[in-house]
Amino acid sequence: MAVAEGIFSYRLVQHEDYEMATKSLKARHNELAESNKQLDILNGGIFATGELPFFKDKIDAIGQFPLRPKKLEILQINVGYMCNQVCEHCHVDAGPDRKEIMTRETMSQCLDVIRNTGAHTLDLTGGAPEMNPDFRWFVEEAAKAGIKDFIVRSNLTIIRANKKYYDLPEFFKKHNVHVISSMPHYTRGKTDKQRGDGVFDKSIKALQELNAVGYGLPNSALRLDLVYNPSGAFLPGDQMAMEKDFKKALKEDFDIVFHNLFAITNLPIARFLDYLIASENYEDYMYALVEAYNPAAVENVMCTNTISISWDGWLYDCDFNQMLGLKVASKVKHIKDYNEELLSNRDIIISQHCYGCTAGAGSSCQGTVA
Amino acid sequence: MANSYYDSADLRKFGKITEWSEELGTKFFDYYGKVFEEGALSAREKSLIALAVSHVVKCPYCIDAYTKDGLQKGITKEEMMEAVHAGAAIESGATLVHGVQMMNKYDKLSM
Ligand code: SF4
Ligand code: SF4
């Protein structure tokens, strides 16, 4: 099939290669490390031939094009792409070899924004945000700004990665941080396959330690939520049903408790896109996303209430657009010129990866949206 | 024309059967959807039953569909394989229980 050939000619990595991958695409000099190559794929192939509709046309049909932001609620700051893990599905293409790290200077610019924003939630992500050398300073300063919900996305294993991180649960507690952690499955086999050997045991230990200081306990103000992404080329199941399964298994097997589970769809960008193409699942996956398109989810996609800030201070509609290098379509493009009013008056940049946000019950960093 | 009887891409086109008989196709898909909703049995249990039956009726489309459905529902590979065995056991049992018919006939015909 000619269409498929067009797509698969981008295949640089054989499937066996990233079974063992310990490096980011960038370090492997993979073509897909370049965001415009990813956009070529997302705009080409089965979409260019008309076999599947463009996202733009789908949302145009319900009067949502151009997609526009609503009231800003969440500031999501990516403090760097360095990570102690190299998960197969990572949309950030994060890893130990990534050197993009937010400086204290950019953090200070962020703090000015945090102190004056109308947003009620601050969401720190990465990479592993804890690996930024100024992470603790930034959390201490940001916590003083009195934001209602202060989230840190922690991959759990970082807490056990090195002695200097052992006190993170206490540190989070001290600053009343809302911890959101990724946990791909409640069985060892599936977790380790997606995230690497030993990840499961370390994550369990980290969760137990978070529980020990009070995180995740019923009625505890110390919020501990888990994020589940499918470990493969399939969509997440019903969030409520998954939460029930996770709660039951983690409680019975490890006496672990947590508050909510967010089921997040993997978006076809970066390493997950590479995996889809190399494993010849790309077309089926895009079909599945388009088939599961839910118009009711469009209204509340993440970019309608979030601004994403990169390690070097640029502004994006979401973390995914950040990875695709699509800066906001606004006069204000950098944190140093931040202006909430101007920013709220922009069109959101979309492409076919957006289908990942509107499949089924929808998907955002806070789980389902519809 | 395709030169083989089964093409995995045909599964995506399943919905098209409605185009040649709107009424029956729609009725079938409504029924199908309803059957797999959460009911007295959970959607998870039904997915495993569907997987076992897919193997018994040896439908490659159904096997693809319900393996994926199982993954989406967080069903483990051990659970999936046990379901396949449950189907296989009934299928071999159904063969073997006919052995009694063979034995009956043998006895009847023998002096
Ligand atoms: S998915 Fe998270 S934990 Fe895994 S490599 Fe990416 S940033 Fe790190
Ligand atoms: S990928 Fe980003 S821009 Fe596209 S719908 Fe999702 S949040 Fe919005």
Image (spheres, rainbow, N blue to C red):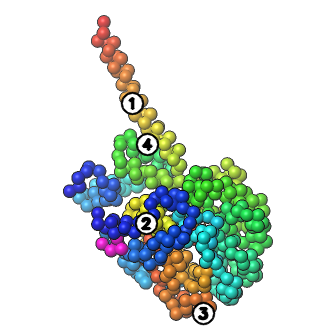
- Which of discs 3 and 2 lies nearer the camera? The answer is 2
Predominant SS along the magenta part? helix
The residue that mark 4 highlights is B52
Q: What amino acid is at disc 4?
A: Ala
Single out the mark in the foreground, 2 or 1: 2
* Label pair 3/4, CB-CB below 8 angstroms: no
| Left or right of A358 in this view: B59 | left
Per the image, the residue denoted by label 2 is A12
At label 3, the amino acid type is Asp
* Front label number (1 vs 3): 3
Find numbered disc 2 in the image and state the secondary structure of the residue it sits on. loop
Residue A318 horizontal/vertical position (percent): 54, 78
Between residues A244 and A325, which one lies in front from this camera angle?
A: A325
Mark 2, Cα crowd under 10 Å, few <14 / some 14-19 / many 20+, is some
* Pointer 1 chain: B
User: x and y percent of residue A210 in the render?
Assistant: 73, 62
Q: Which mark is residue A337?
A: 3
Question: Do the residues at pointers 2 and 1 share their chain?
Answer: no
